[in-house]
Image (tube, grey):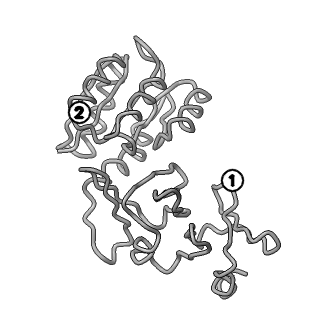
Amino acid sequence: MKTILIVEDEITIQLGLERILLSIDPSLNIIKTAYASEALEIAQKSIIHSFLLDIQLLDYTGMLLGEQIRNINAYKFTPIIFITAIPTKEIIAYKQIHSYDYIIKPFTEEEVKRTMETVINYYQTPIQKDSNILKLKHKEITYNYRQKDILCIEARNRKLMITTAKEVAIFSKYTLSSIEKELDDNFLRCHKGFIVNADYIDKVDKSRLSIYLRNLSDPIPIGRKYIDELKEVCL
């Protein structure tokens, strides 16, 4: 059973979110609280599969709560979705805490469903060898990434970083070579530490040996040993 923790100080919004989530999956276990301190206790005692956090709470901010949740090893990669009526604060939290997404008040049922259906399906999508889903595990949780949503994959300091338009997730116990075997033909090895999704290539700077991807500000380096292979596709 998947558990979602809603931390929201307006009871009507709590109940509305619960109703929408259960309409997506009636088997969900929904826990609700209005207090950040209580939410932290719940997270420490239970296994939470995703968090819905209001930015402004009764005791302290959802941003601080998000930081505290990220400091718990079991929740380093767990989806956090912020809820707020103040978009600027939410964007800051989105970047600092690597939240999965955010919902701006007032929101519609469809907006919540669009965000939460993907989060919920992380834990229930059947995985087939040819399903174009990249399956990664961390502790007791399995994360399913649609390959078409992945911009690039980076190996650094014995960690693997999966970058999508919405998040950067970090996993251990994986290598680029092992992941490369699971990827479809859209992915290109451009560097010893990088694999990119060719569908997102916006520009290739041959003089600086760099690739620029849509939705990603920093360039991706091109290793000299991979130039010939890349020429056939995009150089």
* Front one among 222 and 186: 222
How far apart are the alpha carbons under marks 1 and 2?
A: 37 Å
Q: Is residue 8 left or right of residue 125?
A: right
- Tell me the quarter of the image containing the N terminus: top left
Q: Disc 2 marks which residue?
A: 30
Q: Is residue 11 left or right of residue 45?
A: right
Residue 131, position in %: x, y? 34, 73
Badge 1 marks a residue whose secondary structure is: loop
Q: Residue furthest right?
A: 207
Q: Residue furthest top?
A: 59
Q: Disc 1 marks which residue?
A: 217
Q: Label 2 near label 1: C-beta < 8 Å? A: no
Depicted 196 relative to depicted 58: above or below: below
Type of amino acid at the residue the image marks with label 1: Ser
- Tell me the quarter of the image containing the C terminus: bottom right
Depicted 115 relative to depicted 215: above or below: above
Badge 2 marks a residue whose secondary structure is: strand
The residue sitting at 49% across, 61% down in the picture is 149
The residue sitting at 65% across, 60% down in the picture is 214
* Front one among 22 and 72: 72
